[in-house]
Image: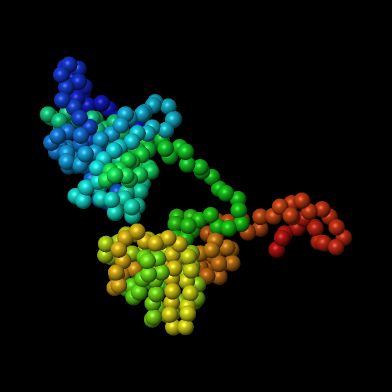
Amino acid sequence: MSVAFNEDLAAHLASGVSTVCHAWAIIRTDGTVFGFTDHDQPLSFAGFEFRADTGLSALALSQSTGLSVDNTEALGALSDSSLREDEIEQGRFDGAEVRGWLVNWADPSQHWLNFRGHLGELTRADGGFRAELRGLTEGLNRPLGRVYQKPCAAVLGDGTCRFNLGQGGYSYALPVQNVEGARKFVWEDFKGFDDGWFTRGRLEILDGPAAGLWGTVKSDRIIGTTRVLELWEPIRGEITSGAQVRVVAGCDKRMETCQGKFNNFVNFQGFPDLPTEDWVVAVPSSGNANTGGSLR
């Protein structure tokens, strides 16, 4: 990331007597924005409002001009009016964008963006938190390329799968009737879908305190007139009877499911005819058709 240094700020620093502080902005994936500063008064610049009463501070920033990963840490106190413990626990800050500035608090127009990245691991203890900040070069650690495997490597509905989950029969919104431990959902009148239709799918919370959270469906069973959806992990938020949820059909990544359930085999991202290890080491024999031809 190349950002031109603010000439006025450079002149201020060269004067020998400086009035600078740090400011940080956190932009969550849901669009919620938080601003903090280690100055003792709030600041406003670059379209952000930075609060001074949150106790947020940053450790030494490690940056380089090469391709190594830039990183730092931020420490802060949890506050109901800023960073809330329940929202951190729910994962609402996971992957949030982070920007950091050096700013002249006497003239906030003199500021320099010296860090930009995302939140990494967050840990909580004793009413505070420690957040790992990962720079833009963190993306260089992400593995790229295709994986040769029999199951599909795409996520249902993503850019490579291209399946439209909005079409009828593959997602359904309805209110919660009974919920146990934020993990098991029970309905008495949820019909119209085969047993197991939503297994490996998603259950998304649309309103209430847990709005925006979702979980992966472990099992979808029809027991008599009752439908029971159980998640792998509980939703980390309060869910009350009547809250609106949306359930999305599941995909087990098999070729047969892609072709029969979704009619989307043209976008299948697996390799169903990939030979197994037993086939690779097989030797010719008179009793088997080891012709070297197609497996199908």
Whether residue 2 sits left or right of residue 151 in the image: it is: left
Q: Position of residue 39 (x, y in %)?
A: 17, 33
Q: Quadrant of the C terminus?
A: bottom right
Residue 97 seen by the camera: no
* The image quarter in which residue 181 lies: bottom left
Compared with 276, 116 (above or below) is above
* The image quarter in which residue 15 lies: top left
Q: Position of residue 9 (x, y in %)?
A: 19, 25
Q: Nearer the viewer, residue 212 or 139?
A: 212
Whether residue 165 sits left or right of residue 21 in the image: it is: right
Q: Residue furthest front?
A: 126
Q: Nearer the viewer, residue 244 or 168?
A: 244
Identify which residue is drawn at 47% across, 41% down.
142
How was this image coloured? rainbow
* The image quarter in which residue 115 lies: top left
Q: Position of residue 222 (x, y in %)?
A: 47, 78
Identify which residue is drawn at 15% across, 19% down.
17
Identify which residue is drawn at 44% across, 68% down.
230
Q: Residue furthest right?
A: 286
Q: Nearer the viewer, residue 46 or 132?
A: 132
Q: Position of residue 3 (x, y in %)?
A: 29, 30
Compared with 199, 127 (above or below) is above
Q: Residue furthest bottom?
A: 225
